[in-house]
Amino acid sequence: MSGGADITVLATGGTIDKIYTLTGELEIGPPAAQRLLDVLSTDLRIEVRSVVAKDSLDLTDADRQVLADAVDGTESPSVVITHGTDTLTDTAEHLSRHASAAANKVIVLTGALQPAAMAVSDAALNLGAALLASQTLRPGVYVCMSGRAVPAGQVRKDPSTGRFVRRPPITAP
Amino acid sequence: MSGGADITVLATGGTIDKIYTLTGELEIGPPAAQRLLDVLSTDLRIEVRSVVAKDSLDLTDADRQVLADAVDGTESPSVVITHGTDTLTDTAEHLSRHASAAANKVIVLTGALQPAAMAVSDAALNLGAALLASQTLRPGVYVCMSGRAVPAGQVRKDPSTGRFVRRPPITAP
Amino acid sequence: MSGGADITVLATGGTIDKIYTLTGELEIGPPAAQRLLDVLSTDLRIEVRSVVAKDSLDLTDADRQVLADAVDGTESPSVVITHGTDTLTDTAEHLSRHASAAANKVIVLTGALQPAAMAVSDAALNLGAALLASQTLRPGVYVCMSGRAVPAGQVRKDPSTGRFVRRPPITAP
Amino acid sequence: MSGGADITVLATGGTIDKIYTLTGELEIGPPAAQRLLDVLSTDLRIEVRSVVAKDSLDLTDADRQVLADAVDGTESPSVVITHGTDTLTDTAEHLSRHASAAANKVIVLTGALQPAAMAVSDAALNLGAALLASQTLRPGVYVCMSGRAVPAGQVRKDPSTGRFVRRPPITAP
C-alpha cells in the first residue's frame, strides 16, 4: 500500500458540510472533515475526498451506487463516509448489500446533527469516533453516531431527538 | 449494572482542561469532557468525574495510584481518562501494571494539544476517538491520541511535534 | 433613570439570531445579543429584549410600527436594534420617520451576515460597534454595519457582497 | 490620503494575541485583530500592523515611545491599538502626553480579558467598539473596554473583576 492512504474519508454532503450563504440559505460546502482533521497531529495518512454533495434526503440510488463504487475503488482498509443523518442508515444498508468492499474493508458512516461550521457541533466528536471505529472493527459496514458504532441494519434515527438507537432485530413470525 | 454508567470518564487535568484566568494565567478548570459530551444526543450513560486536576508534569506516583484505585472502583466496562499529554504514556504504563481492572476493562487515555476552551482544538476529535475505542477494544490499557489507539507501552509522544507515534518494541539482547 | 438600563437592545430576528434545528432548517432563536454580551465585564446596564422574531424579508409595516413603539417606550438614551440585513436600511428609514424617540435617542441598527451561532461570524464585531455608536453619536437613527455607522437614508446593502455602502445623496433635479 | 488606510490598527501583544504553544505555554502570536477583522465585509481600508509583541506588564517606557512614534507616523485619522489589559490605561496616559498625533487623531486602545483564540472571548466585541470609537470621537486618546470609550486618565482596571471603570477625577486639595 505504498503511497496510499491509511484511511479514506468520503464526503457526501449533509448537515455536517452545510454552510450559510450571503443570500441567507444553507448550502453544502467543501468537506468539513478536512478542516476537522487539520487539528490532528498524526502520521496516519488520511485522504479526504468529495463523492457527492447533497442533502441526504435528495440522495438517489444512483448516488448510492456512485458511492459504493467509490468505496470499492479505495485502496485503504478503512473508509469513513460523512453523510446527512436523515438517510444515513439507508445508505449504510445499501453499501452492505452493494459494495463488494464491505467484505474486506471497515466502512463507517457518520455525520452531525449540527453543521461543523457552527460554534457548537457534534461533528468533531462523531468524526473522531468514526476514525477510530474504522481501525478497530472487523470488516463490514457500520453506523457511528450517538457515541457508538452499530452494524448497518441494526440502527435507526429517532427523528424526534436526532438520536441513533439500536433497532430490535426483525424476527421471522 | 443497573443504574450504573456504560462509560466512565475520569478527568485528571492537563492541557485539555486548561482555562485562562483573570490574572492572565492558565489553570485547570472543570473537566472539559463534560461540555464536549453535552453536544452528543445519545442513550449511552456516560459519567464524567474529576479524580485529580493537575498539569501532567506535576502528577506523582501517589496521584497515579489514586487514579488506579478510581479505575478499579468504577463499575462500567469502559473507562476513558483525560490527561495531560506530557506524561500520558507514563500513566498508561503505570495503570497497565497497577490497575487490576486492566484485566477486564477497556481503559483508554486521551488528551489534547490545545485546550478544549480554544476555538480550534483537537480535544473533541480525540475524545470521540477514545469513547469509541473504549467500546471496541479488548480489555487492557490504551493511549488514544493522533487518531489511533495503541496499547500502553507501545507509544511515545514526540515532543517536537506533539505527535504520538508507535514505539518500536524493546527486544531482549 | 434610576433602575433603568443605560442601553436597551431590541432583537427583531434576522440572520444574527438564526439557529439550526433538528429537522435541518434554520429558525430564529432567542436574541443572540444576550449571549454575545455575556462575555463583557461591565457596569453598564444593558437590557436585551425580543420585539419580533422574523426573517427581515418577512417584516411588515405593522411589525415596524411595533418596533417604533418599542423604541419610543424605552427609557434608555441609547437603543441598539438587531435586525436581518435584507431590509435593515428600510427599517432604519421607517424609524427615522415614525419613531418620535429619534429626536432625543441614539438608535442604532445592526445585524450579521453570518449567524452568531456560527464558529466564524461578524455578529460580535458588529454588535460591539453598534454598542459604541449608541453612546457616542448624536440623537437620530443609524445603520451600523461594515465597520461604520451611517445615518438612516444614506446607506444601502450591496446584495452581491453583503457589504453596506454609502449611498450618494439624492439631489433634486 | 490616496492609497492610505482609513483606520490603522497597531498591535502590541497582550492577552488578546495570546496563543497556546506545543510546550504548554502561552505566547504572543500574530495580531489577532487581523483575523477578527477578516469576518467584516467592508470598503473601509483597515491596515493591521504589529509594533511590539509583549505581555503588557513587560512593556517599558521605551516600548511606549516606539508606540507613540508609530502612532505619529500613521497617516490615517483613526488609530486603534490592541494592548494587554494590565497596563492599558498607563499606555493611554503616556500617549496622551507623548504622541503629538493625539492633537489631531482619534487614538483608541482596546484589548481583551480572554485571548481572541479562545472559543469564548470579548476580543471581537471590544475591537468592534474600538473601531467605531475611532471614527466617531473627537481627537484624543481613549480607552475602549467594558463596552464604552473613556478619555485617557479617567479610567482604571479593577483587577478583581477585570472591569474597566471610570475613575473619579483627582481634585486639588
Image (cartoon, coloured by chain):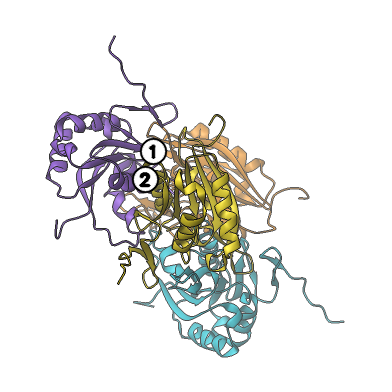
Chain colours: A yellow, B purple, C cyan, D orange
Tell which residue pokes out farthest to the front in this image.
Answer: A173
In the depicted view, which residue is nearer to us: D60 or D123? D123
Q: Residue at x 66, y 40 (%)?
A: D73
Mark 1 and mark 2 lie on one chain; the one further toward the N terminus is 2
Q: Say which residue label 1 marks.
A: B148
Spot the residue most to the right: C173
The residue positioned 47% from the left and 68% from the top of the image is C20
Q: Quadrant of the C terminus of chain B?
A: top left
The three-letter code of the residue at mark 2 reads Ala
Q: Tell me where residue A68 appears, x and y as whole percent.
A: 55, 53
Is C47 situated above or below C96?
above
Asked if the residues shown at circle 1 and circle 2 are in contact, with their CB atoms under 8 angstroms apart, the answer is yes
Q: Is residue A164 visible?
A: yes
The residue pinned by badge 2 equals: B129
SS for callout 1? strand
In the image, what residue type sits under mark 1?
A: Arg
Residue at 56% x, 77% y is C55
Q: Residue at x 47, y 32 (%)?
A: A43
Give the chain of mark 1. Answer: B
**Quarter-of-image position of residue A62:** bottom right
